[in-house]
Image (cartoon, coloured by chain):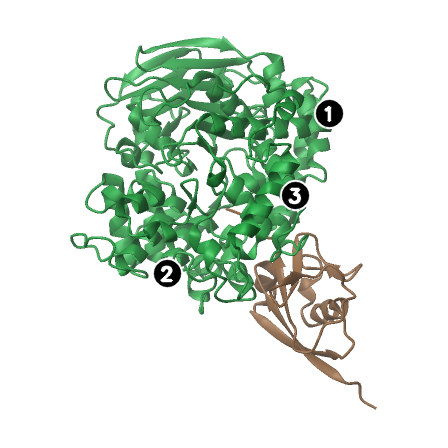
């Protein structure tokens, strides 16, 4: 098989055994790889209704079709599981050499079942699987674990996906780290690994990934590299996505103080430009990427001297304006702690912002030595450690904002900023109505990366302050583009390098696989995968009321900036959601209609 | 007889700010000046904007650059006549992260 290996590895941690299964051409063609393949395998191997942190949960790692080849910025791998944060589809992506190496070891995907009786790490050494004792690694941070495993195995070329102490302690937004700073970040897959006593997966791959037409793939890759180093991606290199702070602030959609405000009076001090000027150490790229968007920041002096980590916009937003913290060295330290302890920076920051507001309202008990309130950078840094260790208030906050608010009660869910339990990213949806819809209906919860529906709002393709019929079609199309890229394993920052993603993507896919795939087939694949994600959620108990947004955002108008006074009342969101269901061919209740299942080859698959 | 003028403020974000080295500039233009006229005037004041930010062929923004009016709407029609006191934003097409 070209492009693919045609094999998945099933690993049973309980029995400490593994087996290879064949992946058919029809399945690969229908679900492409990456996110699509991961969700397909999860759907097939997971029994409905399982508690996400029980041994019955399943976690799948799947590579894109181009991983292991020369196609640039196409080395994303997908992680799918039942999320301990949302109770729905857990769906995360990471850029990585891990996927290149897994493909070279001979696998398109790895499916993890069961739970080991003691901490282990799995070493996939080409086609041999070892279950190795990880008791000495338990308690180590993500980066240290990667290094320790490479040292133990005596091979610098081994690639490792590992959890930190947050995953071990079942923090519900724990991530999985790889390549010293790339994360499968959202929806808590690190906690699922922790629940399975699985510290890491290490891979050594010595094979090659064949493509059908070497010359064509080479030429297309050269063209993409040229595009990827041109103006289409310039914004990612200088100053990087952190440049969004000033722009979103000016547009009045920068969430501040747990979404109580939408703009800072003085944003320069926390801006990406200031961060870059004061702390930028170097720009690096993740696996096989010609863009190089990763901005590594370093603190040279002061109490956080030595802190060093890459910072993107969402991290800066969540640990900065959302917590009303303008201390850049503290933000860098906080981000570094999240990465090393293995926690999603976005959920960490937004959960902390909820806690700061709850504490200021007197709804949280005092925590020994940590004075949680907006703007207290020291408290933010201290509490991150406590969350990872589940100490003091960290025990509550490790549950994420939704469950923490349920536990605290006293109407604190009013200002818990999540959708389906996933904390929202750094754009205020009241001033971006298409994006608001994308957040509300997202299968992994409120997420910009899965919906991409912010684009038409911010590019002026629509009136971003207006809710109207037609947005459902737009949100659907944007979502299907996102899932297509996630399934091909191509970084979303590459999307501007394609004039017509479906046409050019189909050509490249055909060159790699040797299968004659049309643009329309890729359109349908994106739609099929989006629908399967929804069917997964329905099987896990999804109901329409979950396709919603936090009460604060539907009851309070925008308080400041160009959109001052604009609101997003529930009826308006309902109109948008219904329009989306109609565009998708779903029932009025939001379930995938039988006719749509038939059309996409998904019939008879609901439990 | 001298032409009547209006003052327009342009705010720079991202690469536009990097190139100009300033956060904003105020320029005097004729009262009938359009968005396209403003881009010409900006290019005259900051020639380095030509290419990466301003397309000097059609006097529009370069690909991946947006021109926004008062933080509320993206300018799609460069013949739009700008009102006195308008604030125009030159910024990158936004991206997640």
What residue is disc 3 on? A474
Percent coordinates x, y for residue B95 in the rendering: 56, 49
Residue lying at 52% horizontally and 29% vertically, measured from the top left: A533
Q: Chain of mark 1?
A: A
Percent coordinates x, y for residue A65 in the rendering: 58, 23
Mark 1 vs mark 2, CA separation in Å: 49 Å
Q: Are marks 1 and 2 in contact (CB under 8 Å)?
A: no
Name the disc covering residue A324, or none: 2
Q: Chain of mark 2?
A: A
Q: Quadrant of residue B88?
A: bottom right
In-front residue for pair A182/A372: A372
Mark 1 vs mark 3, CA separation in Å: 22 Å
Residue B12 seen in render: yes
Mark 3 vs mark 2, CA separation in Å: 33 Å
Is the residue marked by circle 2 packed among few (<14), some (14-19), or many (20+) residues within 10 Å?
A: many
Of circles 3 and 2, the one toward us is 3
Q: Are marks 1 and 2 on the same chain?
A: yes
Say whether residue A70 is left or right of residue A206: right
Is the residue marked by circle 1 packed among few (<14), some (14-19), or many (20+) residues within 10 Å?
A: some
The colour assigned to chain B within the rendered structure: brown
The colour assigned to chain A within the rendered structure: green
SS label for mark 3? helix
């Amino acid at each position: 098989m070209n492009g693919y290996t045609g094999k998945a590895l099933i690993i049973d941690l309980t029995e400490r055994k593994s087996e290879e299964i064949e992946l058919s051409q029809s399945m690969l063609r229908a679900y492409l790889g990456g996110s699509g393949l991961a969700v397909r395998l999860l759907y097939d191997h997971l029994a409905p209704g399982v508690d996400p942190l029980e041994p019955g949960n399943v976690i799948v790692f799947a590579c894109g079709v181009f991983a292991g080849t020369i196609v640039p910025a196409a080395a994303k791998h997908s992680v799918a599981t039942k999320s301990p944060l949302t109770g729905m589809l857990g769906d995360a992506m990471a850029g990585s050499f891990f996927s290149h190496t897994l493909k070279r070891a001979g696998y398109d995907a790895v499916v993890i079942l069961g739970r080991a009786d003691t901490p282990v790490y799995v070493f996939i050494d080409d086609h041999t699987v070892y279950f190795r004792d990880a008791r000495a690694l338990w308690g180590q941070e993500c980066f240290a674990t990667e290094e320790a495993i490479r040292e133990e195995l005596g091979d610098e070329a081994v690639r490792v996906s590992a959890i930190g102490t947050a995953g071990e302690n079942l923090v519900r937004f724990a991530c999985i780290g790889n390549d010293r700073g790339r994360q499968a970040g959202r929806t808590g897959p690190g906690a699922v690994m922790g629940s399975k006593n699985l510290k890491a997966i290490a891979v050594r791959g010595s094979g090659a990934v064949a493509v059908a037409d070497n010359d064509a793939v080479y030429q297309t890759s050269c063209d993409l590299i040229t595009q990827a180093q041109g103006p289409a991606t310039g914004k990612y290199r200088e100053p990087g996505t952190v440049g969004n702070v000033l722009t979103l602030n000016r547009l009045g959609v920068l969430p501040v103080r747990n979404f109580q405000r939408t703009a800072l009076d003085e944003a320069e001090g926390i801006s990406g430009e200031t961060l870059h000027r004061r702390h930028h150490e170097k720009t690096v790229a993740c696996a096989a990427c010609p863009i190089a968007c990763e901005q590594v920041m370093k603190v040279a002096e002061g109490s956080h001297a030595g802190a060093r980590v890459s910072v993107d916009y969402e991290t800066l937003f969540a640990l900065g304006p959302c917590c009303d913290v303008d201390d850049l060295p503290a933000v860098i330290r906080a981000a570094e702690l999240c990465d090393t302890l293995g926690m999603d920076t976005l959920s960490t920051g937004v959960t902390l912002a909820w806690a700061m507001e709850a504490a200021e309202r007197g709804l949280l008990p005092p925590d020994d030595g940590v004075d949680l309130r907006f703007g207290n950078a020291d408290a933010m840094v201290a509490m991150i450690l406590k969350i990872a260790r589940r100490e003091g208030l960290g025990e509550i906050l490790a549950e994420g904002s939704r469950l923490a608010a349920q536990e605290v009660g006293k109407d604190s869910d009013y200002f818990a900023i999540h959708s389906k339990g996933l904390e929202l990213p750094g754009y205020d949806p009241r001033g971006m109505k298409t994006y608001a819809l994308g957040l509300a209906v997202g299968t992994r919860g409120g997420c910009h990366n899965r919906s991409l529906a912010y684009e038409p709002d911010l590019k002026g393709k629509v009136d971003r302050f207006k809710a109207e019929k037609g947005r459902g079609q737009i949100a659907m199309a944007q979502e299907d583009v996102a899932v297509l890229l996630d399934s091909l394993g191509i970084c979303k920052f590459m999307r501007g390098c394609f004039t017509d993603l479906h046409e050019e993507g189909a050509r490249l896919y055909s060159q790699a696989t040797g299968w004659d795939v049309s643009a329309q087939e890729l359109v349908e694949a994106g739609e099929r995968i989006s629908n399967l994600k929804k069917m997964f959620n329905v099987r896990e108990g999804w109901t329409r009321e979950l396709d919603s947004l936090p009460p604060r955002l539907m009851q309070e108008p925008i308080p400041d900036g160009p959109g001052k006074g604009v609101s997003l009342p529930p009826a308006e969101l309902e109109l948008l959601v219904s329009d989306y269901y109609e565009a998708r061919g779903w029932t009025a209740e939001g379930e995938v209609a039988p006719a749509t299942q038939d059309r996409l080859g998904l019939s008879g698959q609901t439990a | 007889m001298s032409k009547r003028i209006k003052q327009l403020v342009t705010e720079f974000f991202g690469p536009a700010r990097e190139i100009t080295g300033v956060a904003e500039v105020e320029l005097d233009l004729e009262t009938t000046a359009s968005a396209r006229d403003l881009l010409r005037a900006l290019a005259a004041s900051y020639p380095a904007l030509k290419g990466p930010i301003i397309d000097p062929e059609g006097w529009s923004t370069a690909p991946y650059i947006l021109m926004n009016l008062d933080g509320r709407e993206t300018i799609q029609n460069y013949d739009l006549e700008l009102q006195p006191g308008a604030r125009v934003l030159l910024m990158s097409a936004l991206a997640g992260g």
